[in-house]
Image: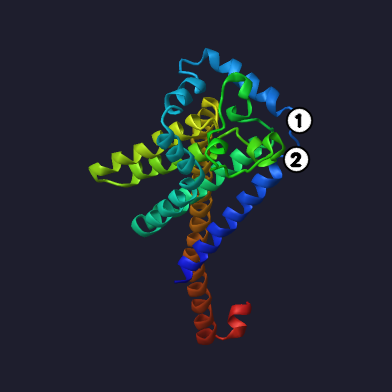
Amino acid sequence: VRLVAWEAAVILALYALWQWGAEAAITSSQGAIGHARWIAQAERYVPLPTELWVQQQFVPHPLMVQVLNIFYAVVHVPALVVFLIWLFVRHPRQYARWRNVGALLTGACLLIQMVPVAPPRLLPDLGFIDTAVAYHQSVYGPGGIRIAPQLAAMPSVHVAWAILIAVVVLREASGRWRWLVLAHPLFTVVAVVGTANHWWLDGIVAGALLGAAIVVESGSRALTNRLRLRAATSDATDVVVAPEAVVQRRTLYRYMDHNGAETLAD
């Protein structure tokens, strides 16, 4: 019970820190549109359909658009919570490792998000539609670019968490049904792009950060294990030496009692 309470407290603290960081990351909208246009131009060299093309495939279908809006606004946090509970219950030995990877990943995303980047939907001149506003499902409300948190579009935490969930489930689970988890990051990418909330590059960077977080966590864990092994080896050496010293002292005392103190003094 204590362990469960402790882990719940840790997760809540990390979530509160993420919420606070997301609010504090963007202090100005200056440069957000320019950075977004730079991404749009850079992506011309990426062999992917444009975000505008993806959105245009859904716009004629109101129900599909509304489903994507709801998915974007609602699913990412509950999905992460369910994933962490599953990992804690079914794979407790691996829980701490992947929790730390998730914390590193989210922290790295927040650092990069301090640079304001406007999402595609705030560039209507390029043809994008703010589908959430159009269907009164926006989590930001009116205000456009003046709503600072929505300028933390690079990288996409939605995509980062979705890829994390898929990677861990595929690695730790053993059933053949585990491959269905790939639907989560795929649908997440479709949702964030189809609603014009993120650029392709936002998701690509998120995936790269996950790889970096895994490497950092693995390296720090290996270093910690080496330090613990060294400390344990040192303690073991002390334990071996100490009894010998005690035996020697006890032997010397018996010798003194048998022969007398004056004989030893000579």
Q: Residues within 10 Å of mark 1 (few under 14, many from 20)?
A: few
Tell me if residue 65 comes above or below residue 90 in the rendering. above
Q: Position of residue 70 (x, y in %)?
A: 47, 43
Tell me if residue 9 comes above or below residue 128 in the rendering. below
Tell me if residue 159 comes above or below residue 86 in the rendering. above
> Helix or strand or loop: what does disc 2 sit on?
loop
Q: Give whichever of 133, 188 is nearer the camera.
A: 133
- Residue placed under numbered mark 2 in the picture: 27
Figure quadrant of the N terminus = bottom left
Q: Residue furthest left?
A: 176
Residue type at numbered disc 1: Gln
| Residue plotted at (39% across, 33% down) | 186
Figure quadrant of the C terminus = bottom right
Residue type at numbered disc 2: Thr
Q: Which mark is residue 14?
A: none
Q: Position of residue 188 (x, y in %)?
A: 44, 37
> Is residue 214 something that shows in the picture?
no
| Residue plotted at (59% across, 79% down) | 264
Q: Residues within 10 Å of mark 2 (few under 14, many from 20)?
A: few
Q: Give whichever of 183, 164 is nearer the camera.
A: 183
Q: Position of residue 176 (x, y in %)?
A: 23, 42
Q: Position of residue 50 (x, y in %)?
A: 50, 19
> Helix or strand or loop: what does disc 1 sit on?
loop
- Residue placed under numbered mark 1 in the picture: 30
